[in-house]
Image (spheres, helix red, strand yellow):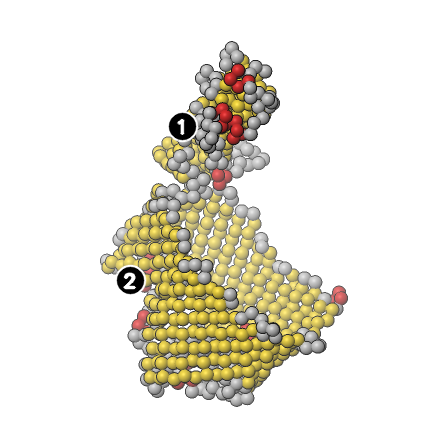
Amino acid sequence: MLVPPACRSRALFAGLVILCFGSVAVGPFPARAQLSTLTGNHGGPAPTQNEPVTFTADSVQYDKNNALVTATGHVEAWQNGHILRADKVTFDRNTGVAAATGHVVLMEPDGEVMFADYAEMRNNMQDGILKDMRALLQQNGRLAANGAQRTGGAINELSKVVYTTCNLCAKDPTKPPLWQIKASSAVQDTEHKRIEYRNATLEMDGIPVAYFPYFWNADPSVKRESGLLPPLLGTTSNIGAFFAQPYYWVIDNQSDATFVPMMTTRAGPQLDAEYRRRFNAGVLDLNLSGGYVDNSPQGSIAATGQFAWDDTWRWGFVINRASSSDYVRDFHLTTGLGGGDQSILNSQIYVEGFGDGSYARLDSKFYQALTGALNSTSLPVVLPRYEYNYVSTPDSLGGRWSVSTMDFNVIRSEGENTRRASLTTEYSIPFVGALGDQWKITFHGDAAAYDASRLNELPVYSDNKYTNTTRALPQLGLDFRWPFARDGGAWGTQLIEPIVQVILAPQTGDSQLTKYPNEDSLDFEFTDANLFGFNRFPGIDRLEGGSRVNVAMHGAWYLGGTTFDGLVGQSYRTNKDNLFPEASGLHDQVSDIVARFSFAPTRWLDLTYRTRLDKSSLATHFADAVATVGVPSFNVNAGYIYTNFNPYTYYDQVAPPPSGNPYYFPRNEVSFGVNSRVGNYRFNGYARRDVSNNRMVAWGADAIYEDECFIFDLRFYRRYTSLDGDNGSTTVLFLLTFKTIGQFGYRAL
């Protein structure tokens, strides 16, 4: 091997070769040492644009007469973050051109990989040409061209271009992919991360379906890119046909915005704008919209924000307001306004903190009704509300104590106004007897102070208009359970566990119904879930008192992969409690019977049933059944719920309307669902039917195909109720997603 004199002193090993300003050096120097020495930069960092070309090869030949260096066999060259691999590379010192042939691979600093049959690179690999180029981009992007010309290391001009993110058929690679874009020419701008096409055609399975004289998409490596998004179009029964053209704007590294102008045939124009920003300590999302309903200007705002002060405290807000329910209905804004199909918009501002076993929150809440069945003037303004909870670590006796408070000021234009301060404390000590019997002693106390006005209005309807009072209820509980387990060998393990809870407490009386406000205890259902406890109401505005005993028998059988679990229980008290309505199951000294049964004989079958039975006739007063059958590839679920308890009883018993409550019907409903996922296909369907009124509540289906490059989503929903009480609505939606390119969809309502 001939080594130029300028580099001969460095020639120590013939396996690693460095091209340095027209010279060839051979040596085993560390990469940084080679770059620093050969470029004359001995003290600072190595340059990034004029680094020498370093490469390895099986053999290297130097033609001194023609100034050619030829490397053959597993050639790998790298410079400025670029890596070139080929079977053979010839470097012309006179022209500075490196010609690569045979299995050419060029790897870019951003992770892009290009393949070619032949390549010529010059100017520190910044310029060059490639023949029969193929590029592997991020997110499975694949780009191919008959030829490519690189300029400045940033622009690749391509001819006869094909782009897709689909894998080729393994059995027949010549078969067209599911979708691809073909163009006569394209420009890949690696600096601005975009690919621009001229005379582009979108093909599906080799069949042209769309033509674009000019088309561009962001490079798959880009997470965000300003530009037009795929258009939205469809028809609705309220606004007619509509067309919307979203625009996405990347403002900076922390924020972006989306603007969606919409034209409709019946309601006129509408504009929706959403701004998003991430801060070092939080996030902000602001959505504003404006349009017309019946030639009247309308609008809405939806905003959320959450910001951390430190590792313990954070604050935030949620704002959801709309000019009318018609505007929300017509433009289907409930997704932006808190999500889902809802009849109330809620707004709040809060600060909360997290400690070891503790939580604190101070907030204010505001509500807006979106249905005629609710009057916004009767909805509360909570200004403010304070919550605190603390649970201690076990003490030397193994006991824990907890304290919580819920204080608020509730204001209404119509209905009661309530100011409350409360305190709940509890201390419990568990211990285990010599025979495996388990015990727990609990001291529990609730206290509250009230200052309320307009108590004679909704929902209490008291004879007294004002109240300023306090109350407290101490309780002592003793819990006992004794699990008996038997190992039956081949017959599995059986468990029998009697459970008893004795509670001693003074009587509270039914004077609570009109003496105290009721903000948090309007609705409850007596089931096995709240059989044991100091208060079966969800809040403390109504407190369950009196001495009582709650008992249950729990049994289970574990047989291989089969599980049977059940519980039957009842409550007994020394006196009737008129605080509970008669239909609640807790009014008398002996309660209704509550039970829960679950049966899972295999992994593909799960049955659960909850019920409440009349203590005398065993008539069903509550039933909740859920069944799931199947495997992940296909499963069916069915449900049934029935209850005869009227949550409006608290209204009716103190101020019964002339013809009963017009807004309540006993709930008697069945539901059915099916889910399937086989390969790239998914299907989901559901249906709900009101048995009492003999009509459907809702039903729908969703069929999805998804692979590595494409998503087809077809959805149908039929809802028989709506915000304004009409006959509901029907939604048909199909959406085509070409991954890394965009979406196209149609919606009909």
Kind of residue sitting beneath label 1: Gly
Whether residue 463 sits left or right of residue 605 in the image: it is: left
Q: CA distance from mark 2 to mark 1?
A: 55 Å
Q: Which mark is residue 323?
A: 2
- In the image, what residue occupies the spot 33% across and 74% down? 411
Earlier in the chain: of badge 2 and badge 1, it is 1
Image spot of residue 36 (x, y percent): 49, 28
Q: Is residue 464 above or below residue 198?
A: below
Q: Is residue 483 visible?
A: yes
Binning the other alpha carbons within 10 Å of mark 2 as few (below 14), some (14 to 19) or many (20 upward) gives some
Residue 609 lies, in percent from the top left, at 57, 70
Quarter of the image with the N terminus in it: top right
| Residue 152 badge | 1
Q: Quadrant of residue 571?
A: bottom right
| Quadrant of the drawing holding the C terminus | bottom left
Query: Which of the pair 624/563 is nearer the observer?
Result: 563
One can see residue 665 in this view: no
Element marked by disc 2? loop
Q: Tell me which residue sits at (40%, 38%) in the image.
A: 217
Give the number of the mark in front: 2 or 1: 1
603 or 174: nearer the viewer:
603
Query: What amino acid type should be assigned to the residue bearing mark 2?
Result: Ser
Residue sitting at 29 percent across and 52 percent down? 271
Task: Determine which quarter of the picture holds residue 732.
Answer: bottom left
Q: Nearer the viewer, residue 359 or 248?
A: 359
Residue 606: image tag: none
Seen from the viewer's position, the closer of residues 121 and 26 is: 26
Tell me if residue 623 comes above or below residue 244 in the rendering: below
Indicate the position of residue 472 as horizontal and vertical percent values.
46, 83
Residue 625, image x, y percentages: 55, 69
